[in-house]
């Protein structure tokens, strides 16, 4: 293997092991054993378990943040909600190990840690969008931060729950999230569904 190939192999093995056992239970010995190399090879590339873990977490955070930000790029406000909810659930489905790593040692409800930092980054992006929408509709833009934290927290906690139960189907989960966020408890749709650009959203509330 080239140095680049070996580094990628060790990262992939570390990612799988951290998702399976958590940071504390994982060991350099196990990573080296699964890679078929000696421990010094692992130390040479990353300096230790903390080095591998930091790179794995940084990669996962970048992937998830990019997905969410891309989903918030344009569209009707309801479509933005749908796209953001779907982006998170897509990530959980496509990168289950990565999501487990992010939430295992830094749960959604924690005030500190890598995942909380990531959620704050996402909430900042949502806050900017909310601020523009609030100002255009005559609401207090100062409340955009509160609403963005509430929305991001709701979606993230639901995503963590869905990771474990894997039901109902992903599209249905996203539709219900948007149903609550968009319509509120007093106007919930009985049978919510996702809308697309091909199916215009109803008149804004």
Image (tube, rainbow, N blue to C red):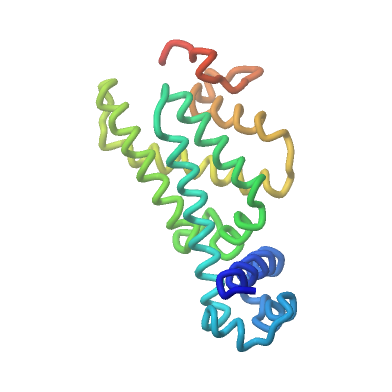
Residue 146 in percent (x, y) is at 36, 41
Residue 14 location in percent, x, y?
A: 64, 70
State which quarter of the image contains the C terminus: top left
Left or right of 126 in this view: 167: right
Depth check: give the residue in front, 183 or 68: 68
- Rendering quarter of residue 2: bottom right
Q: Is residue 205 left or right of residue 8?
A: left
The tally of labels here is 0
Rendered location of residue 37, percent (x, y): 70, 82
Locate residue 73 relative to residue 32 in the image: left or right: left
**In which image quadrant can residue 26 be found?**
bottom right
149 left or right, relative to 12: left
Residue at image position (48%, 62%) is 58
- Residue drawn at x 53%, y 78% is 46
Residue 63 is situated, as x and y percent measured from the top left of the image, at 51, 51
Position of 57 relative to 74 (above/below)? below
Q: Residue furthest front?
A: 2
Question: Looking at the image, which residue is at 40% across and 51% down?
Answer: 120
**Measured along the vertical axis of the image, is residue 153 above or below residue 112?**
above
> In the image, what residue occupies the spot 66% across and 18% down?
191
Above or below: residue 100 compared with residue 122: below
Is 20 or 39 nearer to us in this picture?
A: 39
């Amino acid at each position: 293997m080239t140095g680049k190939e070996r580094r990628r192999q060790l990262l992939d093995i570390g990612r799988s092991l951290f998702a399976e056992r958590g940071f504390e239970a994982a060991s350099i010995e196990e990573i080296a054993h699964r890679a078929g190399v000696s421990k010094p090879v692992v130390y040479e590339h990353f300096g230790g378990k903390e080095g591998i873990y930091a790179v794995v977490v940084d990669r996962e955070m970048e992937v998830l943040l990019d997905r969410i930000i891309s989903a918030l790029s344009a569209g009707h406000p309801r479509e933005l909600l749908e796209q953001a909810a779907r982006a998170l659930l897509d990530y959980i489905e496509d990168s289950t190990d990565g999501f487990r790593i992010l939430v295992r040692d830094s749960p959604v409800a924690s005030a500190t840690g890598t995942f909380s930092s990531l959620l704050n980054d996402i909430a900042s992006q949502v806050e900017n969008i909310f601020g523009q929408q609030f100002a255009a509709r005559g609401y207090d833009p100062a409340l955009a931060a509160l609403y963005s934290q509430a929305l991001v927290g709701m979606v993230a906690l639901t995503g963590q729950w869905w990771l474990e139960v894997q039901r109902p189907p992903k599209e249905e989960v996203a539709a219900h999230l948007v149903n609550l966020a968009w319509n509120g408890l007093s106007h919930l749709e009985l049978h919510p569904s996702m809308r697309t650009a091909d199916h215009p959203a109803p008149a804004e509330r």
